[in-house]
Amino acid sequence: MSEAEIIHNCKNQHAASQKLLYDRYAGKMLSVCMRYINDKAEAEDVLQEAFIKIFANIVHFRSEGSFEGWMRRIFVNSALSALRVKQLKFADNIDNHLNHSKVEASVFDKIGAQEIFEMIRSLPNGYRVVFNLFAIEGYSHKEIAYLLNITESTSRTQFLKARNALKEKFTNKHKMKITHE
Amino acid sequence: MNKEENNFEEFLRSNLENHTVEVSDSVWAGIEKKQKNRDIFVWFRHYLNVFVALDVIFVLGLTVFTTLNSYEVQSQNQLNETIAFNENKIADNKSNKEIIKHTIINAYRTEEKIETKIAENTNIKVEKAQRNRKKINEPIVGEISSFNKQLKQGSSAVIKENTKQNKEKKTSQISTTQLALQAQENNNKSEPILYAFTNLPSLKYQAISNAKNNSNFINERSENIEVLSASIELSKPKKVLKEEQKKAMKVQKEIAKITAQIESKNKSNQENKATESLNNVIPETESLANNNEDAPLTFDTVYGKKKFKGYIAIDALISPDIAFSNLKGSSEIAQNFIARRDSAERLRIAYSALMRVNLFINKNIFIHSGISFSQRKEKFSIEHKWQTHEDYIDSSKYVTIVDPFVGNVIYKTYDTLDYVSTYKETLEHNLVMSFLDVPIMVGYKWIGKRSGIALQAGAICNLLFKQKGIIADYNYTANDVTKENQNPFNTSAGLSIAGAISSNFKLSDKLDLLIEPHTRYVLKPISSNAYPIQQKIFTYGLNVGLRLKL
């Protein structure tokens, strides 16, 4: 069954199609949720709530854009709500993470999706949320500032710190791999 | 640098795009469970309108049922109360009869005592043996043949004398003071006369001697005997008592008959008969119940009593109306036309017919709604005059124009003629407007015994607004309104406010006559915004019809 057919059936509250939609996207969307929420059980709760929201509001989806993009926004928003982002603390102090570290091109070939996923999850809350929103989801710093109730400069700083931290993790991971080999 | 960073982020995005995490089964189970609950809510919300409609029907139905049922129960209870009351009354009558007997006995004893005293104090010879007192309940004392309950001492009473000596029965009207004087004047009578007269609430028997040449005796020896007030009413002549007993028996029979009817299977039909027959009986029973505050209420009617709860009634009304228009022109031409129209338009005939359901929430407040059809006619004619000018060359005349200063001929030509044509046209306006409306009104009713008056106000929603005929347009053309491009009216008349003063007169228990002056004002112009004449309409009328109480 095509995605359009599934969506159409889901709009008519067709239970089997809802299950199909769930099966198709649950794993991927749990990955999205877990990039924001470290605890898996909590992320699964968010996943559950977000799917219910999707089934309830799928009638409003006009098929004008990407359905996955539309879903992803719902999951991200649900995850942010669960994180209570307003209570997140974002340190503005400039530390050594702002020193731009470089990642060798060869590193990219040797690190898989799961490792990247884990590395992102290992970032501190503030870094992780801003990095996910900016680098992965494509939000602008202005949007992030609005979503997280922070200034744009804070968003930028958090992102830079997150990226440098991540690059460092990449390099370290690569070094460890070489050592193991 | 930027390129490298962009590559880094792109690398992350591409790697994470299809990254999945295994989801535990409990997630879908939870979704399914919540989804089911939500489905019920969605289903409920989807059919909310249906539920609301059903709810309204149910409430209305319940109201009707409760109202009718309360009448039934009330009728049954009142019937039982009436039966019990009349049975008690009959029993009371029996006991009253005993009281009368007792009173009469007392009267005999009193009379005997008086006679004895008279004999002791005067030289009048009283021969007891001459009296015929075989029947103890036939008093020889004077009887009140009639009396006024408002009678006070000193005022007159009709007294029937029944004396042993004069066997003729004599009826006289006499005052209490005159009574004593009369007794004195009749001093040649050998026997005392016992007169009775009233001084409510007690009944007094005053024995007056016809003591010869002993006027003081009257004052000294008169005796008052008070008897029970309960016997006052029944101290009327026996004939009256017998009539009342007959009535009571008749009532009892009627009640027994009605009770049997109510208990039978055809309850509803027979109940009507019972109500009618009981209502016929009630005036007779009322005479028994007049002085008893504990007497049960008669059956509730619309102008009901204490137990009134509410009811539903259907009205069918027709009304001759007078229709008015408020016209405003947005241009000078339109205003001129309106002025001519106002002077030309005389008769504004309209009528309306209305069927509505009234829900009386209590005996005073009611709401009603229904369907109304009304039609108004506009008919007038305007005489429209206009002129045309046409120039023709008059070949019969040749004109030479000469310069007045120089004297030379400037121009030679034929003359021209200006033909002025005057035209007259009568512009007919003959329009019929039809309205189909739903009135929703609230009212307050003041209730009389057989009539009532109500004030009501509310809104009228227009369902359908149709026109047919020819209209005289502001530019003095006649337009056929059935043609879409010539129709200046809106498709709906919109909302109106309405008010009425309703009078109802009871024809029977179920039927009222309604007379209802009413007015209606349409809030928005019925003509479209683009039309230069804005027409607002209002109507006065007199609804006449019937109200059937369910």
Image (tube, coloured by chain):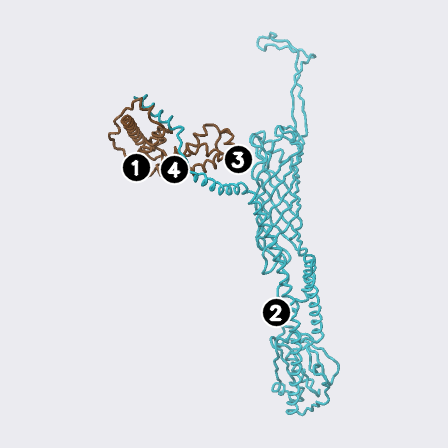
Name the residue tied to disc 4: A43
User: In percent of the image, x 59 and y 53: which residue is there?
Assistant: B445
Q: Nearer the viewer, mark 2 or mark 1?
A: 1
Element type at mark 1: loop
Query: How far separated are the C-alphas under marks 3 and 2?
Result: 73 Å
* Residue A13 can be seen, yes or no: no
Q: Is residue A65 above or below residue B163?
A: above
Q: Nearer the viewer, mark 1 or mark 4?
A: 4
Q: Earlier in the sequence, mark 1 or mark 4?
A: 4
Task: Respond whether the residues carrying marks 3 and 2 are from the same subunit.
Answer: no
Q: Amino acid at mark 1?
A: Lys
Q: Are marks 1 and 3 in contact (CB under 8 Å)?
A: no
Q: Are marks 1 and 4 in contact (CB under 8 Å)?
A: no
Q: Which one of the lettered chains is coloured brown? A: A
Query: How far separated are the C-alphas under marks 1 and 4?
Result: 20 Å
Q: Which mark is residue A12?
A: 3
Element type at mark 4: helix
| Colour seen for chain B | cyan
- Residue B362: x %, y % from top left: 57, 55
Name the residue tied to disc 2: B292
Quarter containing the N terminus of chain B: top left
Element type at mark 2: loop
Query: How far separated are the C-alphas under marks 2 and 4?
Result: 83 Å
The answer to which image quadrant residue B306 occupies is bottom right
Q: Nearer the viewer, residue B462 or A42?
A: A42
Q: Amino acid at mark 4?
A: Ala
Q: Nearer the viewer, mark 1 or mark 3?
A: 3
Which residue of the protein is positioned furthest toward the front in this rendering? A181
Which chain letter matches label 2? B
